[in-house]
Image (cartoon, rainbow, N blue to C red):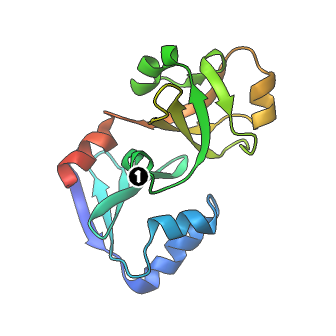
Amino acid sequence: MKIKQRHFIRKSELRPLKDEILKQYDQTFIDQIFPKKCNVEVIQTEAGDTLYAINNVLKLFKSKDGYIPVLTLLLNNQVNLKTIIVDFGAVRYVANGADIMRPGITKIDPSINKGDIVEIREETKNRALAIGKAMFDASEMESKNSGKVVKNLHTIQDSIWEFEKQFK
């Protein structure tokens, strides 16, 4: 992933950015991502991705599915998202970017709504594997026996993950 353009945003541009993110998340998420004093850098890649580094730490990227936190924030317990737990058999597939299928899920956060950005964790070590977008409400997911229920958006070893390692 190559950088096409990067620049810091002004303080006056920060409020509209936070307001846009608030449409997707709650105030707690905003507080976890943006410290009181922060420098926000916008990074445009040649692939058309928009990434956000806050105080020189890559924290968010924008996709067609909205603003997605970088997986390392979940691994370091810096951000809390609604959670879906998958069984050990699903780990390899999810880590390689596969969408989350209903049979592989062992636990679903009951507060999940359709369209929510969720954390996918594995059941044995309870570690974050991926970030996805819920395709159904929690109750609908529970009632299903098969099929895709969460779209996989970001995993360990995808292009964003690799870029973040180089960014540090």
Residue 47 rendering spot, x and y as whole percentages: 31, 45
Residue at 77%, 20% (x, y): give it.
Answer: 144
Residue 158 rendering spot, x and y as whole percentages: 33, 34
In this rendering, does residue 51 appear at all?
A: no
Residue at the front extreme, as displayed: 125
Name the residue beneath numbered marker 1.
Answer: 73
From what the image shows, is residue 14 above or below residue 33? below
Q: Is residue 76 left or right of residue 137?
A: left
Residue 148 rendering spot, x and y as whole percentages: 63, 22
From what the image shows, is residue 159 above or below residue 89? below
Q: Quadrant of residue 146?
A: top right
Label count reads 1
Residue at 40%, 49% (x, y): give it.
Answer: 70
In this rendering, does residue 39 appear at all?
A: yes
Q: Quadrant of residue 115?
A: top right
From what the image shows, is residue 165 above or below residue 16? above
Which image quadrant: the N terminus? top left
Q: Is residue 67 left or right of residue 162?
A: right
Q: Residues within 10 Å of mark 1 (few under 14, many from 20)?
A: some
From what the image shows, is residue 49 above or below residue 9? above
Residue 141 rendering spot, x and y as whole percentages: 74, 28
Residue at 20%, 55% (x, y): give it.
Answer: 168
What is the three-letter code of the residue carrying label 1?
Leu
SS under mark 1: helix
Q: Quadrant of residue 26?
A: bottom right
Residue at 27%, 49% (x, y): give it.
Answer: 164
Residue at the bottom extreme, as displayed: 12
| Residue in front for this viewpoint, 136 or 30 | 30
